[in-house]
């Protein structure tokens, strides 16, 4: 399968097409609305399911196999927010607060992009390692904390303590980590009991979720003019840089083609779940137009459509594939 | 029927602030409150992500003094950084002592 | 534009009472009502189980006489045993005959 | 299996019994309420699932096999609203606006009735053709447009343009057609990925949906007195006429026993999803008591209980069966 | 604290009209609005299908002139064909310039 | 498997761990909230599913096998509320109204505890009889009525008639009994059609439900001080007494190890769905702090964690096991 074929498969997957349908719905001003309760339910479901699966897999992973990828992830969690911050300050001339806020988003992980990548490698017969969801938590949390630390250092104020508490108690991280612990403790046996809800329907649920995200992303696109050309470029190029970094480090850490690719996608993706909540508390002065439009309006669609096949091609190439 | 005249303060704010606002108004002397989920638009365009919910509409019936304190606090802390508005009305209630 | 001055009665009560309250206010002469789902806290701490829902916020626009009768009834039957509050305001409506 | 046995099977299916439970709940004034968000979620789900399955099936259907049923459907989409309109005007003495509003409902399709019919033929080991859901969209849209055109011609005003845009952008048609396109483009492979959500649970979800519809229909029944005996008769007899027409045309077009029966049921059914929305815009003066009570209070329960086995018996008979 | 007196217009209408009403009030000069989902009964019995949602309760704080224009427009276009009611109250707000 | 091992299995099941996660979420003041609509949906789902399965199983159970367990259940439905009432009046010095209100809760059944017990015996390879859900309805309804009758006799007033109507029309009993009738009439064949929704995902759905219940129970715990030490002791010991009674009567009635254990758990559990609604109408003066904190804050977590393995050990022992 060459890269073009991969691209075709990705673009014609039900999930990506549902995202497009969501965009279309907004553009034709349809009265379609996903109920808030459904959106919240799907989010809870996805985070808990990611956690459960990761935890159950971790229970079966020998530490010898896990520590290198874990280390690679921690390195990414330090590098990527710093990289974003410096780029935004130096090249983009953003002020401290907004640069840090955006960096928190690009350092952490988009859960839906992560799932889309996992689904993709599975469809491509190159499934990622089972413990990947654990890496999501490992990348997510430190990246946000570091971005907030930078802002605090520069501003010399702010309630970092509360922000960190809030990140851990925040529903995203709580569900992700809680799910991991449940999965770990109850093990593969426990997971089997709940597979009919938390494993099998996973991809189908993603379709509903992406329908909604398409609608939200399309609304964000209306703000494109407000954010300026630099941030648009940033939203398209930074994922490529961070993605390559992630795929490279993952490969170095001995991960499989699929695993390194998913790690790369995680690095390339920008959070719009945990990060906005944390930024809202620690940096309320930051402008949501910037960080939400960049992460949800630009980077998310880019990764979902073009990024995923690209990172996969890169991972295959690094692993000596065609 | 003994109707008592009190103030009804309505605060419309991002859902995300719910817990904090409730804590604040209780500290300032509110004896109760009612919240409904809402959505809306004002001068601040975008809002935090959907995952954090939309707006809330918080109502509290209180004495004029407490009502004033609540508005004051909103003006000091919230109006600058968050999407929040507030307004006050006169209402007549029964069992006026319940609210003060 | 002919605006007519009427009373707006707002009742906040446990969701569980919805059907009964609607029946009562209709009997007392209300010509319509609007309900939103709400949550809140007051002097009664706990509430019936979640399964029975939270609070409702019931509004009805009515003549002063009907408004008074509604409040009276609430005071007689509901205030003692249920988590219910009510308040009245003056509002201006168009098509005043619609409400009386 | 004779017709009585078919009737028994249909009446004792979980879906029909759930409908009855919904009616009972309303009659005994239960405090049972289906949350709005659940109702909306189920609707989105059903429409998207119908579309997905139809699209995926269409991707495998040769045009040679498809064009005749498609043509039969288009003929129905012109005939049935005209038939309803003329009947209501001539025999029922309805005014133009209300006759056209009701005709729009009886021309278009009830998604839930369609699903119930598909489930029934499957249980009877006579599954309908896979492309049926595509026919739903083909019947739905023109029928509404024609009914509105009639009203407009007679009234000499109204914003038909906006009404047509609204039908296409309306959530029902958008999900149905969007789902079909997604199903078509991602094909049977794509459908398999999401089958655990959009295929397997289909019938079970229908149970929940019919529970709610039972409650709504029972409430509508309270308006029966307001609509008068003519409309009650219309709601019971018109489905028979249109159903027979549909089964006949479907059989002529070479469809299977199951397929012709489902097409007949589609013709016999009255929309309460897409049509009310469209009528609301183009003909706001029309009285909802008429069109909702007739379609949801009378025709829907009739089709669900007695109509479905009848149309099946007819289709079998036309195909030379017992 | 500088409280300014303004008008609060509340419109209760079928959910289906949401987008249109928002467009209209913005055109007439409203600077913001808040919507909650509601249900209710009035003189028009049935409503469009459930799939189209129930009622909405739309609030907007505006100057007396804009409030009057909004009521006027409702009376002209909506009252005849749709299930809509509206009422006006006086409210006190902070940062009065935000609303005009 | 010894009792400790059973305890370990139970405590490390995904369901119990999800309950703990819910408690943790409340303790760390997470912003996690289960949407009301989801909670209601899950409740509707669980009650309907319990009913459907019970009804379908009953359709295959010969009366000869069923009457003894049914009788045992009816005996329990009279004994347990009386026992609770007398204990609360005599030892606890509660007034008539509150004693009757609490007795109504402890007489009836907690649906979620019932499901957790059924899941547990299944995991322990000792599944309960299929007709168990029917017994839930048989235990639930009379127990509440009896408790209310007591209060009425003592108070000499109240609208018992309406309370009884309300219990039957109340959504919990309506869904449970309605589901049973649907399951009975449509039989195992009908159940198979909807198994993908009402059977397979059952345990997974329980995880979501218990996440929410953990959050609610933790909030109730804040009221512990208000209810006083007697009620805390009552909430911990009464389940043991009633549970032993249930296991014993079930074993006498010839039920299996799993069946007797589930019946015991039903007797031990305290309702927080049907009972609060009924009490609310018949005894509005009763204080919800008492009955909700005891049933949801104390007895529910106790049964879920320690009670279930204990009742199982007892049942095995009574059946001559290790
Ligand atoms: N003029 C207004 N009338 C009613 N609600 C408003 C108005 N302006 C703002 N709001 C509400 O207050 C929220 C925050 O307003 P803002 O800070 O202006 O974005 C909005 O999302 C609306 O729900
Ligand atoms: N001071 C208040 N302001 C606004 N709402 C209140 C107030 N007090 C009580 N409520 C509402 O009325 C409900 C019942 O109040 P209570 O009977 O005091 O528990 C509460 O759940 C609140 O929603
Ligand atoms: N008297 C009233 N008080 C409060 N709300 C009302 C009243 N009359 C009507 N409504 C609301 O306005 C909506 C439309 O009213 P109508 O056009 O009379 O059917 C109803 O569904 C109610 O939500
Ligand atoms: Na990232
Ligand atoms: Na039709
Ligand atoms: Na019990």
Image (tube, coloured by chain):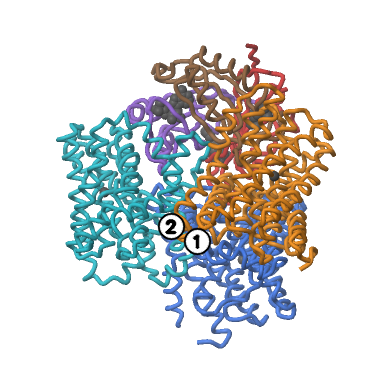
Chain colours: A blue, B red, C brown, D cyan, E purple, F orange
Is there a contact, CB below 8 Å, between mark 2 and mark 1?
A: yes
Q: Nearer the viewer, residue F249 or F110?
A: F249
- Around disc 2, counting alpha carbons within 10 Å, would you say few (fewer than 14), some (14 to 19), or many (20 or more)? many
Looking at the image, the residue that sits furthest to the left is D90
- Output the chain of dot 2: D
Q: Nearer the viewer, residue F49 or F138?
A: F138
For label 1, being within 8 Å of ligand 5 is answered no
Q: Calculate the distance from the C-alpha at mark 2 to the C-alpha at mark 1.
A: 8 Å
- Ligand 3, seen in the image, is in the quarter at top left
Q: Taking C87 as reference, is F322 above or below it?
A: below
Is residue A89 shown left or right of residue D130?
right
SS of the residue under disc 1: helix
Where the N terminus of chain F falls, by quadrant? bottom right
In the rendered image, which residue does mark 1 sit on?
A: F196
Locate residue F56, reporting x and y percent: 51, 55
Q: Taking D24 as reference, is A129 above or below it?
A: below
Asked if one can make out residue D281 in the rendered structure from this viewpoint, the answer is no
| Quarter residue F278 falls in | top right
Q: Nearer the viewer, residue F137 or A97?
A: F137
Asked if one can make out residue C93 in the rendered structure from this viewpoint, the answer is yes
Q: Nearer the viewer, residue F201 or F246?
A: F246
Locate residue F80, reporting x and y percent: 72, 41
In the rendered image, which residue does mark 2 sit on?
A: D203
Locate residue A254, reporting x and y percent: 66, 82
């Amino acid at each position: 399968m060459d890269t073009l074929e991969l691209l075709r498969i990705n673009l014609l997957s039900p999930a990506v097409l549902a995202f497009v349908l969501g965009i279309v719905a907004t553009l034709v001003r349809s009265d379609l609305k996903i109920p808030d309760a459904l959106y919240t339910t799907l989010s809870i479901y996805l985070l808990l399911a990611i956690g459960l699966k990761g935890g159950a897999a971790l229970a079966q992973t020998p530490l010898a196999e896990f520590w290198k990828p874990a280390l690679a992830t921690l390195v990414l969690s330090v590098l990527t927010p710093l990289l974003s911050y410096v780029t935004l300050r130096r090249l983009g001339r953003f002020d401290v607060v907004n640069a840090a806020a955006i960096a928190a988003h690009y350092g952490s992980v988009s859960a839906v992009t992560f799932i889309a990548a996992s689904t993709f490698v599975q469809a491509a017969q190159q499934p990622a390692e089972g413990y990947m969801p654990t890496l999501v938590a490992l990348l997510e949390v430190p990246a946000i904390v570091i971005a907030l630390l930078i802002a605090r250092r520069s501003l010399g104020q702010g309630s970092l303590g509360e922000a960190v508490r809030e990140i851990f108690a925040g529903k995203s991280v709580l569900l992700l980590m809680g799910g991991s612990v449940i999965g770990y403790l109850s093990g593969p046996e426990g997971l089997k009991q709940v597979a009919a809800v938390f494993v099998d329907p996973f991809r189908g649920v993603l379709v509903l979720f992406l329908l909604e995200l398409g609608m939200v992303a399309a609304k964000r696109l209306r703000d494109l003019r407000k954010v300026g050309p630099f941030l648009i470029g940033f939203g398209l190029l930074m994922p490529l840089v961070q993605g390559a970094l992630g795929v490279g480090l993952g490969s170095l850490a001995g991960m499989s083609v699929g695993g390194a690719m998913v790690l790369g996608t995680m690095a390339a993706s920008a959070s719009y779940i945990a990060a906005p909540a944390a930024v809202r508390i620690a940096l309320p002065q930051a402008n949501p137009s910037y960080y939400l439009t960049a992460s949800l309006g630009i980077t998310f669609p880019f990764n979902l459509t073009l990024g995923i096949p690209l990172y996969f091609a890169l991972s295959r190439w690094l692993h000596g594939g065609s | 029927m003994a109707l008592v005249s009190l103030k009804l303060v309505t605060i419309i704010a991002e859902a995300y602030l719910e817990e904090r606002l409730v804590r604040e108004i209780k500290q300032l002397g509110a004896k109760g409150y009612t919240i409904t989920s809402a959505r809306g638009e004002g001068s601040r365009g975008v809002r935090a992500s959907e995952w954090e919910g939309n707006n809330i509409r918080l109502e509290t019936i209180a004495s004029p003094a407490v009502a004033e304190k609540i508005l004051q606090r909103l003006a000091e802390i919230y109006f600058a950084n968050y999407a929040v508005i507030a307004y006050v009305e006169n209402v007549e209630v029964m069992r006026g002592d319940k609210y003060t």
